[in-house]
Image (cartoon, grey):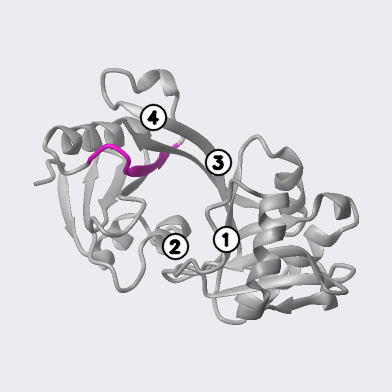
Amino acid sequence: MIIADQVLEGRDAILAAAGHHPYVRNALARDEAPRGWRRDDAVGWLLPAERGPRGGAIGAPGPAVDVFADQVARGALRPGQWLHLPRLDPAALPGRLAVARHDEWDFLWSAAAPPRQPDEERVARLTGADHPALTALIEEAFPSTTSRPGDPRIVDWYGIRDGDRIVACGADRSRGDIGFLAGLAVAPDRRGRGLGAALTAAMTRALLARHDTVALGVYSVNVGAIRLYRRLGFAAGLARSSVQLA
């Protein structure tokens, strides 16, 4: 049972309450049956237990934390599960939510095609035969990413080759109503040559052929990547805090 000002049943009701915000359009896939709520200036949801992250919210962080703290107390949320919340001060959590990890990141989106970049023509869709090379690049360039070959959330992989080597890669992890870029990585010895810009621009262009909006997530401390994405047209953003329950 969710105690809130208004209980929202199903994806359509949550989207309507959230004003069809791009973040919510991405977070809630069409085949999911989330339970949602509205409290004060926050709209949130819980996904079925087999899906992850377990819950999320947009709007004011305080009411969101209160609702999820109540769900922890009732046993609806367990240690190890993740919540994607509005950006909040970690100092506001002790005594309300016990967390093992707290990440700050930004959800950026664009509805316009990016400026054309040099080397975009080198970006190609990859196949299952490329998975070993993809894994090697990811381990070298972005070992902390959760996007890996074989991940069922991934629709397609894209990359840039240099001979038999893949030197840049990115995943189309689209869900819900919008396109989503994930796992963008460039080999350390090829950085500073514009390959990240070429990859991001080409993938954005490809996904805009199927979606009206394309988004991505980036850690807030990665100011260089944020500067690049802004230059490519990802001008709208939403500050997020992701917490793993302890």
Name which residue type carries label 3: Trp
Check the image and report above or below for 233 versus 160. Answer: above
Q: Residues within 10 Å of mark 1 (few under 14, many from 20)?
A: many
- Cα separation, mark 1 vs mark 2, equals 8 Å
Q: Which residue does the numbered mark 2 point to in the structure image?
A: 26
Tag nearer the camera, 4 or 2: 4
Q: Give percent across and percent down for residue 189.
A: 87, 51
At x 63% / y 71%, what residue is drawn? 131
Q: Earlier in the sequence, mark 4 or mark 2?
A: 2
Q: Earlier in the sequence, mark 1 or mark 2?
A: 2
Q: Give percent across and percent down for residue 80.
A: 32, 40
User: In the picture, residue 66 is in which quadrant?
Assistant: top left
Is 120 on the left or on the right of 182, as rendered? right
Q: Which residue does the numbered mark 3 point to in the structure image?
A: 105
Name which residue type carries label 4: Ala
Residue in front for this viewpoint, 149 or 21 = 149
| Residue 1 marker | none
| Residue 100 marker | 4
Q: Residues within 10 Å of mark 2 (few under 14, many from 20)?
A: many
Tag nearer the camera, 4 or 1: 4
| Residue 215 marker | 1
Name which residue type carries label 1: Ala
The region drawn magenta spans: 78-86
Q: Residues within 10 Å of mark 4 (few under 14, many from 20)?
A: few
Name which residue type carries label 2: Asn
In what quadrant of the picture does the C terminus appear? top left
